[in-house]
Each structure stands twice: as structure tokens, then as C-alpha cells.
Amino acid sequence: MTSQQVIDIGTRALIVTAKVAGPFLAVVLAVGIVIGLLQSVTQLQEQTLTFVPKLIGSAIVIAVSGNWMLATMVSFGHELMDSVPALLNG
């Protein structure tokens, strides 16, 4: 196993991580900005007010794209396990 192969595996793992985490981060960021703007406009500075909408947004993301996320991670795991014999042989 060469260092280039390790770098390739790491790069693919980071890409899969970004693809899977992207929807969560986008939804939580958007909800946080909207709630922050509403808090600024209304001058209501309640800390727990941001938590519940972010939790609901995350639950919606899981419900909508959870199957795709799981399939993406399983596919990457299968590709990685299939490449093990080639990596060990050199």
C-alpha cells in the first residue's frame, strides 16, 4: 500500500463525508440565520429558541434524505472493502 493510495482513500472519505453532512449543515445554517434575524428584529434573546427549529430541520433532513445518505455510506464501505485485496497485493 503506497502513500498515494492512502491519500486517495482519505480524499474519497472526505468527499463522502462532505456529501452526507452537507444537507445537515445547509439546513441548520439556514434555520440559524433566519432565527437569528427574527431574534434581532424582535429583540427576543432566548437561547432555547434556536434549538427546537434546528432539531426539527435536522429531523426533516433525515426523513427526506436519510435513505440516500445511508446508501452513499454503504456504497463507500463496499468500494473500500472490495479494494482491500488489491491494496494488500501492492
Image (tube, rainbow, N blue to C red):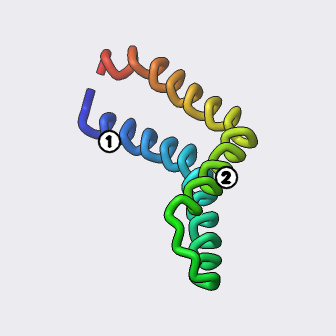
How far from the left and from the top, in percent, is residue 82? 49, 18
Q: Residue at x 62, y 52 (%)?
A: 23
In the image shown, does 25 or 81 lie closer to the viewer? 25
Q: Residue at x 63, y 64 (%)?
A: 31
Residue type (three-letter) at the residue carrying disc 2: Gly
Residue plotted at (58% across, 76% down): 44
Q: Quadrant of the N terminus?
A: top left
Q: Is residue 6 left or right of residue 17?
A: left
Of circles 2 and 1, which is in front? 2
Where residue 39 appears, as percent x and y from the top left, is: 59, 76
Q: How many marks?
A: 2
Please, what secondary structure does the residue beneath circle 1 have? helix
> Which residue sits furthest right?
64
Q: Assess disc 2: are there few (<14), some (14-19) or many (≥20) residues with their C-alpha within 10 Å of its C-alpha.
A: some
Type of the residue with mark 1 = Ile
Q: Position of residue 73 (x, y in %)?
A: 55, 31
Which residue lies under the disc numbered 2? 57
Left or right of residue 74: residue 89? left
Residue 74, disc: none
Q: Neighbour class for label 1 at 10 Å: few (<14), some, many (≥20)?
A: few
Q: Are marks 2 and 1 in contact (CB under 8 Å)?
A: no
The disc at residue 7 is 1
The quarter of the displayed image where residue 74 is located: top right
Using the rendered view, name the quadrant where residue 59 is placed.
top right
- Earlier-in-chain disc, 2 versus 1: 1
Mark-to-mark CA distance, 2 and 1: 34 Å
29 versus 61 height, above or below: below
Q: Position of residue 65 (x, y in %)?
A: 70, 41
In the picture, which quadrant includes the C terminus?
Answer: top left
Q: Secondary structure at mark 2?
A: helix
Picture residue at 57% right of the left edge, 62% below the top: 50
